Amino acid sequence: MIEAVGLTKRFGAKTAVDQLSFQVRPGHVTGFLGPNGSGKSTTMRMILGLDRPTSGHVTINGRPFRELPNAQRHVGALLDAKAVHGGRRARTHLLALAQLSGIPEKRVDEVLGVVGLQDVARQRTKAFSLGMGQRLGIAAALLGDPQVLLFDEPVNGLDPEGILWVRNLMRQLAAEGRTVFVSSHLMSEMALTADHLIVIGRGRLLADMGVQEFIAHNSAGFARVRVADSDRLGAQALGEALVKAGGQVLKEPDGALRVTGLTLPHVSDLAHEAGVRLWELSPHRASLEEAYMRLTQSAVEYTSTEDPRAELFEPEPLTVPAWEDEGAHQVSGPTAAAFYAPPPPGAAGAQPFLMPSRPGDLAGTATDPEDPR
Amino acid sequence: MSTAVLKSEWTKIRTVASTVWSLVSALVATVGISAALCWAIGATFDDLPQEQQATFDPTVMSFAGMTFGQLGMIVFGVLVVTSEYSSGMIRTSLAAVPRRGTLLLSKLAVATALALVVGLLTSFLSFFLGQAILGEHSIGIGEPNILRAVVGAGLYMALIALFSMGFATILRSAVLSLGILMPFFLMISNILSAFETTRKVSQWFPDQAGSKIMQTVPGTVETPYGPWTGLGIMVVWVLAAVLGGYLVLRKRDA
Ligand SMILES: Nc1ncnc2c1ncn2[C@@H]1O[C@H](COP(=O)(O)OP(=O)(O)OP(=O)(O)O)[C@@H](O)[C@H]1O
Ligand SMILES: [Mg+2]
């Protein structure tokens, strides 16, 4: 169990971590998410006593890391896979770490086997690829067979087989009742690995909840409706009926409709009443990535500036169909944001990124997540 | 300190290339340059002025190359510490064992012990080779004070290495540490000692005070301290550097 209370770290004028309080519980994989520079690594370094908090404190099983007796047997960490002396061989690197806490030499060979590095154990680590270095870092974290594990971007640079292996490893470690705290930028991977999420932006807590709950809170799903190609008038009629029933409708480039605000059975009923033949009526659940993007958009510090050539590659925009009256556009503005589509000309186009500026505004659909501000 | 951490530090120190080449160069430079200078002075001894002949110290002569050889010790001391920082290994180590004092003291103990072994090897080799070359102007190890000087020379090299380790722990940067220590011990300290007025200050420098231990013939230069006190002054410098390093490591983020 890791517990942070009011954790704050300033580097000069820069506040890297700001009043962060959270708990990481045993038996779960807890994902640690946040944009670049949001303070994830700094938080992890504070947990491990490498950086001293400006204020607040963080404990592992009730004690500050620096006061843990035989710390390596309780806590294992991969912070930076490159934090290895390149001139040393993989095995001696691990051996030196193992000897620190009197861990027997045979455990070194064990973990080398676990991470699949046994064949390169006697190579100097400077010749290691990114993924091999990452595996070596994971091996080091596992040395003491610890109850609490911290991994800072462990899948960075791993091949698909390696990513799958890390996912299973994390899940297995958690299933054994250990505390697993993992940061990553790969949302699809996190969605599969983590049970619980802690999301920060600009050093502050944005969300602390289960993965499913997080997605539900921070995104809106939609229904895709495709009317039979032959039935042009039908599409028009159905669109009108959907809007009248309170749904918001956007037209995809190939003619399919994205409907929000109505349940699937309701859409089906309306189509039936309008006598329209459907080729597709499918639910689209938002991904963790989408939910994450919506939550953190306002907290992103380092965004790329627009490349003028980018518009050459821009996909055909979604359009507001003719039957949507102007009034509906205003309402559907925030909803349109959910699809990352540029605004239709003249409609609700005030927000440059089509992102709500505050997480609380999210699409106005889901109940407000706890507003961090 | 604990045996576990000492073992780990020994594993680390023996598995990096810089340990070997820096220590070997300390030995080779000291022995080689000393031998060359002994040969040169032996060949021209009769041309020397009377007073220089009278105060000729064959022991000091056989350590003449140490001015350069000590650079190897400085490099060794600096790299042992800074390679941990430049590679990031210090964070990996501290994330495993958070007791910073233990970690630092164990590292310094292991590295200093190794430097002492190499230092003693160097001083004895240098002494015997130098005396063999000096021939009729040489002195035996059994004469008064000679063994003290030879053992002292080994201690001096180990202390220079330890001083460099402490200094590098404060600065954490190899370039910065070497950029200050090498010119200081190679030139600045020696140049300042060449002049009567500046010597008043420079005689208290660690290398000037410490090298008094190698002197067996009262020289032309008077110092307000004897050989052991001189070495003691050097030890005070070394302890100050180590303490400084410890405080920095304990206080600063790693
Ligand atoms: N030693 C330091 N000195 C000064 N500023 C620092 C230091 N370490 C981190 N920072 C700053 O603190 C902020 C948080 O950095 P941190 O590395 O914790 O972010 P992160 O969430 O891990 O980012 P990423 O996803 O890119 O790894 C950044 O703005 C960074 O510039
Ligand atoms: Mg980071």
Image: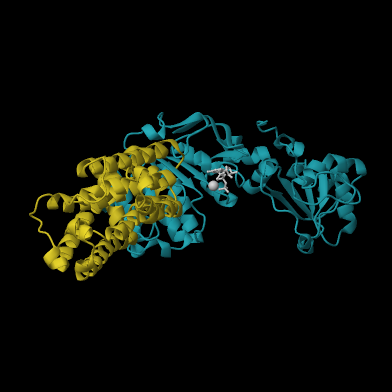
Q: Give the colouring mode of the picture.
A: by chain
* Chain rendered yellow: B
Residue at 43 percent across and 39 percent down: it is: A48
* Chain rendered cyan: A
Expressed as whole percent of the image width and height from the top left, the position of residue A195 reads: 52, 41
How many tags in the picture?
0
Image vertical order of residue A344 relative to residue A29, above or below: below
In what quadrant of the picture does the C terminus of chain A appear? top right
| Along the viewing direction, whichever of A166 and B245 lies nearer the viewer | B245
Residue at 36 percent across and 33 percent down: it is: A68
| Left or right of A211 on screen, residue A349 | right
| Left or right of A367 on screen, residue B123 | left
Residue A281: tell me if it is visible.
yes
Residue at 61 percent across and 36 percent down: it is: A13
| Along the viewing direction, whichever of A318 and A15 lies nearer the viewer | A15
Q: Residue furthest left?
A: B142
Expressed as whole percent of the image width and height from the top left, the position of residue B236 reads: 30, 39
| Left or right of B24 on screen, residue A211 | right
Expressed as whole percent of the image width and height from the top left, the position of residue B219 reads: 22, 51
Residue B162: tell me if it is visible.
no
Image vertical order of residue B206 relative to residue A59, above or below: below
Image vertical order of residue A47 relative to residue A226, above or below: above
Q: Residue furthest bottom?
A: B43
In what quadrant of the picture does the N terminus of chain A appear? top left
| Along the viewing direction, whichever of B142 and A92 lies nearer the viewer | B142
